[in-house]
Image (cartoon, rainbow, N blue to C red):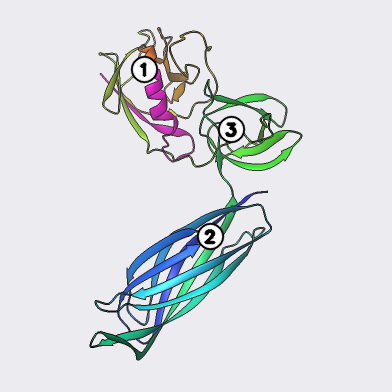
Amino acid sequence: MVKSIKLKLSKIKYSGDSIGDDIRMEIEILNQYSRIDKRIKVGTTAEINKDIGKFETDQKIFKANTQITIIEKDILFNDVGNINGNIEIDTSATKLKQFVFEIQVRESRSLLSRLFWGKRIAIFEIILEAQIGGIERYTPDLEDGWLVTQTGQSKQVSLPAYIMVYPKYIKNGREYFIPSEGIYRDELLSAPLKDDNSSYLISNVKYEPMINAKYSISEKVFTLNRKKYKATDYPEAPWKKGIYDIGIPDYPHGSDNAYAEAIKQKVWFPINFENARYLHVGARSAGCMTIIETTRWIEIYNALIKARKGDFKNVGILKVID
């Protein structure tokens, strides 16, 4: 099983002699490079808590060479110390693991532009922390917007694009995983592998901040990111003024050929108004908020599908006005 390892620079402790307080740390691990500038006085410990690397491995023991350089920045000559060390992590562990590196930096001085060593020696204790976890993956953005999966009871269910999941194992040509959001959150699902036995799941998806949208009942206009879209609703099931959540899409709606020009037309976004209302594309409404500019639906889809409110079920909020 593939695991993720996140390394963090936790603290730096400054002891020994004082050689100055303008410190730079340079850390390189498996070609991932970090630089941290910090003012710190001798006799103190600074909390840094900065991520310095993220790695994936399918090995039980993860090993990596670590190069750390400490620089006290001076006008004429920098004081520099460094160390080459190793980190070794048992990926089956669940607790944080700490690594402590001690670096000595000797003061340097100049006389008539010539460098010589002083007597002061500073000691820097660098504390790294490793957190081990599962690798997050995401559902792909397929042509119709849905990845067909299967529950443990062999029931077919579909997931929209960019749902975060945690892969568990591969068996009999299927990949098993657990979604961390949406209506199937925490449920074990599986999807078939591709013809070349590769995964449909993707990585490196970056979520966008939550969406703030608006709908005018009187004007029949939906506003998103300062763009206005013509819409319609159903007078016999009127909307009420208020603020509502826009949810992560739940399951496919409609058909692929109702509006040939409306890309991703089967992806509807639920709105937590009464009687299961949705934001979707179409020509008419039975109570939902329907975008009638069918060729522009993909603009709304692209803006909403990667947005997240941070509650594992919504992409943003909708303000309904007169």
Is residue 277 in the magenta section? no
Mark 3 element type = loop
Residue 64 percent coordinates (x, y)? 58, 64
Q: Name the residue carrying label 3.
A: 184
Of all residues shown, which one is farthest toward the bottom? 119
Observer able to see residue 291: no
Label count reads: 3
Cα separation between marks 2 and 1: 45 Å
Is residue 306 in the magenta section? yes
Q: Name the residue carrying label 1.
A: 296
Observer able to see residue 114: yes
Circle 3 Cα neighbour tier, 10 Å, few/some/many (<14 / 14–19 / ≥20):
some
Of all residues shown, which one is farthest toward the right? 172
Disc number placed over residue 30 in the picture, else none:
2
The kind of residue tagged 3 is: Tyr
Residue range (magenta) = 296-322
Instruction: Give me the residue at 38% from left, 7% from top.
Output: 236
Mark 1 element type = helix
